[in-house]
């Protein structure tokens, strides 16, 4: 089994910072992309940012210049540094990994349990 365990969410005032982390563990052969999605109440889950094993990353327009994703391939861990937070960043943030569990398995997506980020105005 594969597990993605997130940490680092919480309550912060507008303009503040938070750092999320996500560690993948279990039966893992290789990880392609890792990333973060978020879902606000009443809204669909949306991509925030993702990073490939080679280090290429992309960001949603709404977070460009404020959020930074980083990754340690050896530790199967990804971080999301969130600066200049805004109330509209309030959401449950989900870690995502596109990986192969074994040499013989297809690549599929795995999700973390989600961590709440609340930004007060």
Image (cartoon, rainbow, N blue to C red):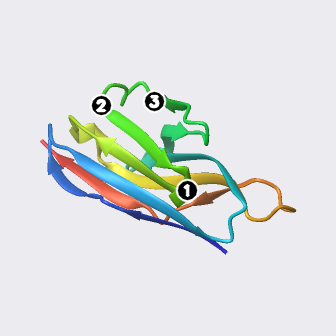
Circle nearer the N terminus (2, 3)? 3
Left/right of residue 57 with respect to residue 27 in the rendered view: left
Circle nearer the N terminus (2, 1)? 2
Whether residue 76 can be seen here: no
Report the residue at 47% width, 55% height from top: 94
Disc 2, SS? loop
Quadrant of the rendering where the C terminus is positioned: top left
Establish if 21 lies above or below 119: below
Establish if 13 lies above or below 106: above
Report the residue at 20% width, 47% height from top: 119
Residue holding disc 3: 60
Left/right of residue 76 with respect to residue 86 in the rendered view: right
Q: Nearer the viewer, residue 21 or 36?
A: 21
Residue holding disc 1: 74
Farthest-out residue, right: 104
Report the residue at 19% width, 56% height from top: 11
Q: Work out how far the residue at label 2 is from the one at label 1, CA to CA, in angstroms.
A: 26 Å
């Amino acid at each position: 089994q594969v597990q993605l365990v997130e940490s680092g969410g919480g309550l912060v005032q507008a303009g503040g910072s938070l750092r999320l982390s996500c560690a993948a563990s279990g039966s893992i052969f290789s990880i392609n992309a890792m990333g973060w999605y978020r879902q606000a109440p009443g809204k669909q889950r949306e991509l925030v940012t993702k990073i490939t094993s080679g280090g290429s990353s992309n960001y949603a327009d709404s977070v460009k210049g404020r959020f930074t994703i980083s990754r340690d391939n050896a530790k199967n861990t990804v971080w999301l540094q969130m600066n200049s937070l805004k109330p509209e960043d309030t959401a449950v943030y989900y870690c995502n990994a596109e990986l192969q569990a074994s040499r013989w398995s297809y690549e599929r997506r795995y999700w973390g349990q989600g961590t709440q980020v609340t930004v007060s105005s």
